[in-house]
Amino acid sequence: MMVISIARSGDMASVFVSGCPLKCGYCLYNRQDRKEMTLEKVVTEMTAQTVKRAFIGGMDPAMQGKEVKALAKVLTQRGVTVSLKTSGNDPNFLKEVLNYADRFVFEIKAPLDDRETWSKLIGKDLEWTTAYLENLKTSLGIVKGKYVKISMRVIPGFIDQAKIERIGEQMRPCAKESTIIQFLGNMLNDYP
């Protein structure tokens, strides 16, 4: 697996993996070092008797589907509650891990009917963005009934209060939790 980092704190372990189909200009993970690790090494570093919860995130774990599915399965078999972050671009991956993850996290970058804003934020053309948004909607349908958290990053000039409200209305049927994240631009990592 291509891993950005692994951390443990109390009863929680997290692994941040590499690879994402989106090309968000503000993504910090794109700028971080990665290391190749075996599944066994990741499991060893993530598990301890005190670990009861695990987060698999980073860029988009679906890009390493086979390994991430195996990791989620092993963690679940050990009684660990698994949360999985995804872009939602690969509905088939979500079907495969559905029984091994208790929670799902999606970053919703704009209202689902706002292709132009999505296209600018994810660095893809409108045709690709349209197909991606259909995959995202399908993915949200697949995880319906599970605990779903959405996060919204407020990027000045792209996301305003009206768009946040639209996202909230669109996500209300499937999300149990939402977080609004302030965008903190800097010279190395500013706008998309």
Image: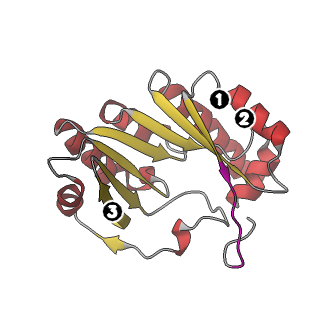
Magenta residue check for 135: no
In screen coordinates, is 147 left or right of 186?
left
- Distance between mark 3 and mark 2 Cα atoms: 31 Å
> Mark 2 highlights which residue?
167
- Local packing at callout 3 (Cα closer than 10 Å; few below 14, some 14-19, many 20+) is some
Residue 185 sits inside the magenta stretch: yes
10 Å neighbourhood of mark 1: few (<14), some, or many (≥20)? many
Looking at the rendered image, the quarter that the C terminus falls into is bottom right
110 in relation to 95, above or below: below
Which callout, 1 or 3, points to the residue nearer the camera?
3
Given the current orientation, which residue lies at the most extreme front position?
A: 10
Determine contact: label 2, label 1, CB under 8 Å.
yes
Give the left or right position of residue 151, taking residue 94 as reference.
right
Q: Quadrant of residue 79?
A: top left
Callouts 3 and 2 close, C-beta under 8 Å: no
Spatial separation of the CA atoms under disc 1 and disc 3: 30 Å
Q: In this view of the protein, which residue sits in the foreground, 65 or 103?
A: 103
Secondary structure state at the residue bearing disc 1: helix
Hey, which quadrant is residue 17 in on the image? bottom left
Residue at mark 1: 171
